[in-house]
Image (cartoon, grey):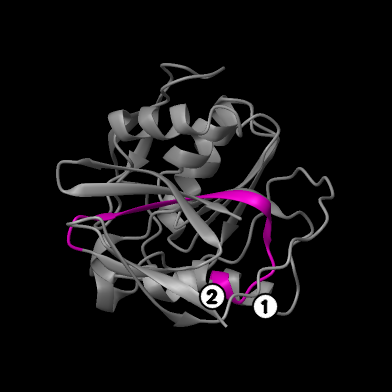
Amino acid sequence: MGYRTIIDASHHRQNTIQHRSDFIPTPIEEKLSIVSRKPSSKFSSQKSGVKKNTNTLQVSQTLRVIGGQWRSRKLPFPSIEGLRPTGDRMRETLFNWLQIDIHQANCLDLFAGSGALGLEALSRGARHCTFVDNHPVAIQQLRENLTKLDCNNATVLNEDALGYLRMFQQTPPEESIDILFIDPPFAAELWDETLLLLEKSHGLSQGAAIYIEAPINAHFSVPNSWSLHRHKRSGNVCCYLYYLT
């Protein structure tokens, strides 16, 4: 039996309760492609009010790549309820933390939305990034942005992030994940469900980096095999960087 650390984001408080940890690293095999899957809805109508048949781009905002080969490039993203790209300052801090890990890393951007985190990783030298989101409008714009950047080392999956993680419990990914970004829609409160699925999966490489973004009043539990490396608060948002030990 191991232990799970409970995080109170508003006070950075850590307690422990019993849990089972069973991460198993898997070999890395190279696969670079952009994949199209059957469209669905990123945020269910019960959680966000976005209708599942929404398929028209409503671009009214832009994000800026902070560093790397696409530095200062501005990319559009659609105006969707619940879609909230990680801010410039937070992204800059995160990738300063990850600077020794990012080169040639295999990344997974769950709840990708605008793709801000995965795009930043690719710009800074990640070997590959898989973007997972189930809102067709967000996915459509992300694919267009990757095409605009002439990017050929990304996989874009239009499917539910939790369903994607459930597959790992039976079939590990072809490439183990070196850097994982977890930034779900805040209102959906999906942190514990996401982390529980990760605890039971076999998708992370040994020493993998896991980034979590959450509001200051969020409470979630992480596996004992994850070591908190850094954390920071910016306004009403907190970010955490863990490593799988």
Q: Position of residue 235 (x, y in %)?
A: 15, 41
Could you tell me which secondary element the residue under label 1 belongs to? loop
Q: Are marks 2 and 1 in contact (CB under 8 Å)?
A: yes
Could you tell me which secondary element the residue under label 2 belongs to? helix
Does the magenta-highlighted stretch encompass residue 207?
yes
What segment carries the magenta color?
198-217
Q: In the rendered structure, which disc, 2 or 1, sits on the residue that comes first in sequence?
A: 1
Q: Residue at x 29, y 70 (%)?
A: 188
Q: Nearer the viewer, residue 212 or 20?
A: 20
Would you name the residue on which mark 1 appears?
Answer: 169
Q: Nearer the viewer, residue 96 or 69?
A: 96
Q: Position of residue 63 (x, y in %)?
A: 34, 31
Does the magenta-highlighted stretch encompass residue 173?
no
Image quadrant holding the N terminus, namely: bottom right
Q: CA distance from mark 2 to mark 1?
A: 8 Å
Amino acid bearing label 1 = Gln
Where, by quadrant of the figure, is residue 61 drawn?
A: top left
Q: Is residue 51 left or right of residue 69?
A: left
Would you name the residue on which mark 2 appears?
Answer: 197
Q: Residue at x 44, y 58 (%)?
A: 111
Magenta portion: prevailing SS class: strand
Q: Is residue 238 left or right of residue 184?
A: left
Q: Position of residue 136 (x, y in %)?
A: 46, 58
Q: Residue at x 28, y 53 (%)?
A: 80
**37 relative to 156, above or below:** below
Q: Is residue 234 left or right of residue 241?
A: left
